[in-house]
Amino acid sequence: MVQRIYNTMSQKKEVFTPLDPNRVRLYLCGVTPYAPSHIGHARGLVAFDVVYRWLLRQYPKVIYVRNFTDIDDKIIKAANEEGIEAVALAARYIELYHDSAAKLGCLPPTHEPKVSETIPEIVALIERIITNGKAYPVAGDVYFEVKQFPAYGRLSGRTLLDLEQLEAGARVEVDTRKRSPFDFALWKAAKPGEPAWDSPWGRGRPGWHIECSAMSSKFLGETFDIHGGGKDLVFPHHENEIAQSCAASGHEVYAHIWMHNGFVNLMPEGCPKCEHTLPDGEGIPEKCSACGYVYAEDDFKMSKSRGNFYPMHELIAEYEPEALRTLLLSSHYRTPIRFSHALVVDTERRVGRSYAALSAMDSFVRQNPSEDGPSFESAFGSNPTAIFEEAMEDDFNTARAIAEVQELFTLGNELLAAREQERLGKKLKAKERSWLLGQIRGFIRSQGEVLGVYLEAPEAYLLRRKQKFLAAHGLSAADIEAKIEARAEARRNKDFAKGDALRDELAALGLSLQDAREGTSWDVRDD
RNA sequence: GGUGCCGUCGCCAAGUUGGUAAGGCAUAGCUCUGCAAAAGCUACAUUCACCGGUUCGAAUCCGGUCGGCACCUCCA
């Protein structure tokens, strides 16, 4: 059993060996809570939740730290605009974030530190960096001196030379207080209207990158196993974190493995100019076919500054959170996802069908209790656990893992339909099928625990979906039942025309009926 | 300009230390049904943007072409 993880530092998959197998340490750059988090944040959240869940299964103890950067220019700006305290604004979005994370099925991390609660550690860390000659104070600010850290640029594949060439291109505004344009602030002198703390350099607040260095070492030590975040953080945030942390500790290595999740990009719903809907399934054309507007490169990039993004709490309210989670896990975590509503609807259908199958399996097993029977492996000649583990060990390949779970559903449905003969070469007794279904259910539960899916009671999932439908249409279950009974009456009288008319009526609402021996049941159609 | 990534069925998406294309959605036919629905079965990429090369053998390696994307500035 060998876990492989793609390390941004080496740009290849590496064998993962924990520094201390009894205490695996994982740090994830969380969010800056100045606005509602969007679907892109959800991707990182979910991707690393699976990493955490999987490590939890492999090792006795995993320490997972996910921070909040609650002191930041954007927070201060937003708070000033609203006329409230920065901490209050941050607290609001942190609460929203927690709520969404829980609904997306993410386990709470071991620690969730905030910058505002880590100031003493940050000040101490900056003092160490200064002592080690890698940072210098200027008029209340403190800057990290990049030239003093030769390894700078290793993570992002840049060199100081590259950066200097870039400087020659006047891409960077020169701040005369800094010794080099690439030096970055560890501490910023207080400005009026900003939260500030006392420090040896006067009142001020931490710069952007230092907080993660301080929070990670506070809970995980100076070197630890895995550091994660969105791809956009590679430069400069993570690069600067490495520089600060190593400059302070004197170690060569800060985090052993750097994991970065890919972005969620928006599939445009329409032209930004005239809102003309783009043809479905096509790529993004050069210009709008209706108004002729030539699309800019980043028209369809999701970004908070442009406001064209999907807040996760809104998506969660609109769709089944588990469908969103499944969608996010259906691609490998490093691959970009082009998000669209059609994609979520597809996934919702898939998840709904899965729960329907789960429900059917459960009731079959209940109705056909069985104490013993053939093992899954002897019956089907494969080991689902091994296949699943192989996928997860290959850089957390959740897309492949989900495909493997899907195979279990196919086998389960086959048994439910008593259609196992073709595959197994013989008919099974109900008790034998039940025994196998019980095992399949166990595999799905176990694998679902790692992926964070298929964990809800199937009936509860299905019922909630029905209730959501009823509420949206202002109907009650009794209304539906009455129509079903009327239809049953008509059918008993062989008045199929009337029965079908009633069924059509319900179908028009978005329902489907299933006639079975025990009676007629109804469900919400997925389309 | 610098750095990195990608281009696989109508759509989504695995597979890249080379060995002959997972899975999902959609679609068609069949089974079941009074008819449906649900479920199951069957079908659905001789082919992996294009052109060369290496090789017994390439979606997977190398070179080139075209196309898309990200970061380099706050950003998950």
Image (cartoon, coloured by chain):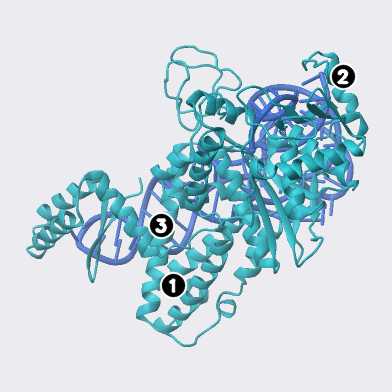
x and y percentages locating residue A177 in the rendered image = 83, 18
Residue type at the position of mark 2: Gln
Q: Quadrant of residue A141?
A: top right
x and y percentages locating residue A445 in the rendered image = 52, 67
Do labels 1 and 3 touch, CB within 8 Å?
Answer: no
Instruction: Tell if the residue under mark 3 belongs to the same chain as the one under mark 2.
Output: yes
Q: Colour in which chain B is shown?
A: blue
x and y percentages locating residue A105 in the rendered image = 51, 55
Identify the residue at the far left of this view.
Answer: A493
Please name the residue shown 56% across and 68% down the image: A446
Instruction: Tell if the residue under mark 1 belongs to the same chain as the one under mark 3.
Output: yes
Q: Is residue A427 visible?
A: no
- For residue A353, the mark is 3
Q: Chain of mark 3?
A: A
Q: Chain of mark 1?
A: A
- Mark 3 Cα within 10 Å, few/some/many (few <14, many 20+)? some
Q: Colour in which chain A is shown?
A: cyan
- For residue A415, the mark is 1
Q: Is residue A299 left or right of residue A55?
A: left
The nearer-to-camera label among 3 and 2 is 2
Identify the residue at the far bottom of this view.
Answer: A371
- Mark 2 Cα within 10 Å, few/some/many (few <14, many 20+)? few
Q: Is residue A53 visible?
A: yes
- Figure label count: 3
Residue type at the position of mark 3: Arg
Q: Residue under label 2, please give it.
A: A165
Q: Chain of mark 2?
A: A
Instruction: Tell me the CA gap for discs 1 and 3.
Output: 16 Å
